[in-house]
Amino acid sequence: LGRSGVDAKKDLEDLMAGLSITVPLQEQVVFQEIENTPTNLWNFLYFTGYLKAIKIEVPPAVPKALVHLKVPNSEVAQIFDDSVQYWFASSKSLSLLQNLRTCLRDGDEDEFEEIFRELVSDSFSYFDVDGKKPEKFYHGFVLGLIVSFSDTWHIRSNRESGMGRCDILMIPKDPKNFGVVIELKTHRSRKESDLIETAKRALEQIEERQYELELRSQGATKIMKIGIGFMGKQLEVLSTIKV
């Protein structure tokens, strides 16, 4: 949003004021263009449940249907408000994101965990992470971090790979770089003693369901697998490297 134009910012103001916005309906959202194309941004938020359609129409002589979008509830409205506050307040976020890109590209597990923890620590102080669907929030948060890396990777979310749907796949455009598989899990207090077990469950799912197959089929030879366990504002990260 910070890089979007005047129209996108006006739309955001309307949404935060409880009004609706109208955009062309895009059934295929292109991650690489989310930063530069407000229509893709609003459609992305619609398909991930952060906006709801109150009306869909097909006007005469218009090639695409138009969808009228609105913030669905006060919980999501708070996320919008908190997000804006965070991105305007954080002076170091861009530097951290560049460092995050570098360690993912190079397969630096320790550096990834350190930077990711710092980003979470900074941002979750602004976000309410105790909503009804925390895993959906975490998924959207991580996607929001990496979507600007689309010049280095093809980014896929909830994509069929191996024997299931992986949370996030990052397919390298340059085969010399690492491909990345990310799986996110929320802590199950009745079954798991700590967040290490939660992160382990995420990493085991990556292995058991062979999510790396999609990366291999696209030419990736080096793969970083990341399992992240969340509980409120706490997290644990486990990862493995396969070359």
Image (cartoon, helix red, strand yellow):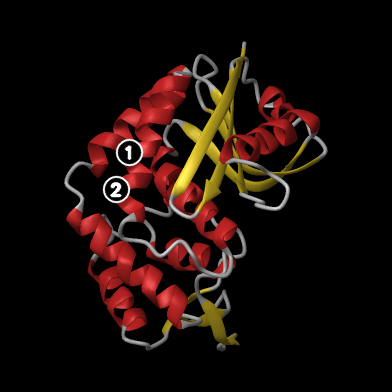
In which quadrant of the rendered view does residue 215 lie?
Answer: top right
Per the image, the residue denoted by label 2 is 122
Q: Look at label 1 and name its amino acid.
A: Glu
**Circle 2 crowding by C-alpha within 10 Å: few under 14, some 14–19, many from 20:** some
Q: Look at label 2 and name its amino acid.
A: Asp
* Residue 201 shown left or right of residue 60 in the figure: right
Q: Which quarter of the rendering shows the N terminus?
A: bottom left
**Circle 1 crowding by C-alpha within 10 Å: few under 14, some 14–19, many from 20:** some
Q: Secondary structure at mark 1?
A: helix
Q: Nearer the viewer, residue 13 or 65?
A: 13
Residue at 48% across / 48% down in the picture?
143
Per the image, the residue denoted by label 1 is 118
The image shows residue 96 at horizontal and vertical percentages of 28, 35
Q: Nearer the viewer, residue 240 or 144?
A: 240
Which residue appears farthest toward the right when viewing the image? Answer: 163
The image shows residue 91 at horizontal and vertical percentages of 16, 46
Which residue appears farthest toward the top when viewing the image? Answer: 243
Q: Which quarter of the rendering shows the C terminus?
A: top right
Q: Nearer the viewer, residue 32 or 116?
A: 116
In which quadrant of the rendered view does residue 65 lie?
Answer: bottom right
Residue at 31% across / 60% down in the picture?
126
The image shows residue 116 at horizontal and vertical percentages of 40, 36
Q: Is residue 2 visible?
A: no
Distance from disc 1 to disc 2, alpha carbons, whole Å, reads 6 Å
